[in-house]
């Protein structure tokens, strides 16, 4: 099995007790990458759901789930669910968001949305680690942290539709002289070398679909539901458009089919 989405490891602070693979608390799982090491998978994909409560306690992960309202009886014996279970990310308290981040939930994963190409800037990784410890530090008024810690703060640019993002997004230039910087569609992308930037700089065509002529195209390859790892296609969605297009992941990957654009 392979992953069809781009993830970025920046939270899972408790996972450091389980593995050293998250160098500086981050790891890319790139398109087509093999399933990650077991401990990283436990954090970013299953969120420790296969662990018994005693194992959560052993690794200190129980603290995060307690802050999300879970109890040992709920976890081990399916004795109900906490209020946070049915909340959208925006409805969580700052304490709950911080706890969710530590067990591998970003806003996109929590709300079961498509994962856009969105990363924390590698220029300020240490600062994003610090921000991840308390998401009240995420605020547009905090300028650099808001722009450079997009995945941590849950303010990734949406990818569906055909409107250029008005906020900054993270662009990643390839090569030995590459960089990761916060850019804008209506400034840097349209300033010069637009075709090259759209095709070669990661994150540009997703954030600036109108400028890059990257509009309203259904994916031809399979996409993955992040909460269960199952692969689906737009052809599968077409067999029951009315029901399957209600799913946000399907909408994002099959915008033409679902009438998004």
Image: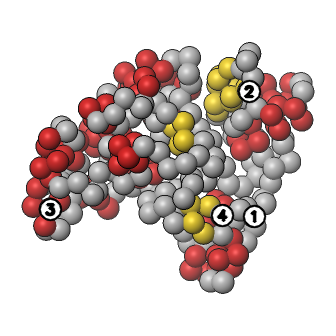
Q: Along the horizontal axis of the image, is 245 left or right of 104?
A: right
Residue at horizontal 70 percent and vertical 75 percent from the top: 235
Of the 4 image quadrants, the one containing the C terminus is bottom right
Q: Along the horizontal axis of the image, is 127 left or right of 2?
A: left
Residue 19 on image: x %, y %: 34, 34
- How far is mark 2 from mark 1, CA to CA? 25 Å
Q: Secondary structure at mark 4?
A: loop
Residue at horizontal 75 percent and vertical 23 percent from the top: 175
Q: Which badge, 4 or 2, is on the more N-terminal residue?
A: 2
- How far is mark 1 from mark 3, CA to CA? 40 Å
Q: Which residue is mark 2?
A: 174
Can residue 133 be spotted in the picture? yes
Badge 4, how many Cα within 10 Å: few under 14, some, many 20+? some
Could you tell me if the residues under marks 2 and 3 are in contact, i.e. CB atoms within 8 Å? no
Could you tell me if the residues under marks 2 and 1 are in contact, i.e. CB atoms within 8 Å? no
Q: Which badge, 2 or 1, is on the more N-terminal residue?
A: 2
74 is higher (above) or lower (below) than 44: below
Residue 108 on image: x %, y %: 49, 49
110 is higher (above) or lower (below) than 191: below
Of the 4 image quadrants, the one containing the N terminus is bottom right
Badge 1, how many Cα within 10 Å: few under 14, some, many 20+? few
Which label belongs to residue 222?
4
Q: Which residue is mark 1?
A: 220
- How far is mark 2 from mark 3, CA to CA? 46 Å
Which label belongs to residue 76?
3
Residue 174 on image: x %, y %: 74, 27
């Amino acid at each position: 099995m392979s992953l069809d989405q781009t993830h970025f490891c920046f939270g899972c602070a408790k996972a450091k007790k389980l593995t050293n693979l998250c160098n500086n608390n981050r790891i890319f799982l790139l398109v087509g990458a093999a399933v990650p090491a077991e401990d990283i998978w436990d954090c970013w994909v299953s969120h420790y759901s296969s662990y018994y409560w005693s194992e959560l306690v052993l690794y200190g992960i129980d603290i995060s789930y307690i802050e999300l309202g879970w109890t040992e009886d709920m976890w081990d014996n399916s004795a109900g669910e906490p209020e946070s279970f049915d909340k959208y990310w925006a409805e969580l308290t700052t304490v709950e968001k911080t706890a969710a981040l530590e067990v591998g939930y970003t806003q996109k994963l929590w709300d079961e949305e498509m994962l856009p190409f969105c990363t924390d800037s590698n220029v300020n990784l240490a600062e994003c680690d610090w921000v991840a410890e308390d998401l009240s530090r995420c605020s547009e008024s905090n300028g650099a942290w808001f722009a450079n810690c997009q995945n941590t703060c849950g303010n990734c640019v949406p990818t569906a539709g055909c409107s250029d993002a008005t906020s900054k997004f993270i662009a990643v230039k390839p090569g030995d002289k590459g960089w990761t910087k916060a850019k804008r569609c209506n400034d840097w992308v349209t300033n010069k070398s637009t075709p090259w930037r759209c095709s070669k700089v990661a994150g540009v065509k997703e954030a600036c679909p109108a400028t890059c002529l990257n509009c309203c195209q259904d994916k031809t390859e399979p996409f993955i539901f992040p909460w269960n790892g199952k692969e689906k296609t737009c052809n599968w969605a077409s067999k029951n458009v009315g029901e399957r297009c209600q799913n946000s992941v399907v909408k994002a990957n099959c915008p033409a089919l679902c009438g998004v654009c």
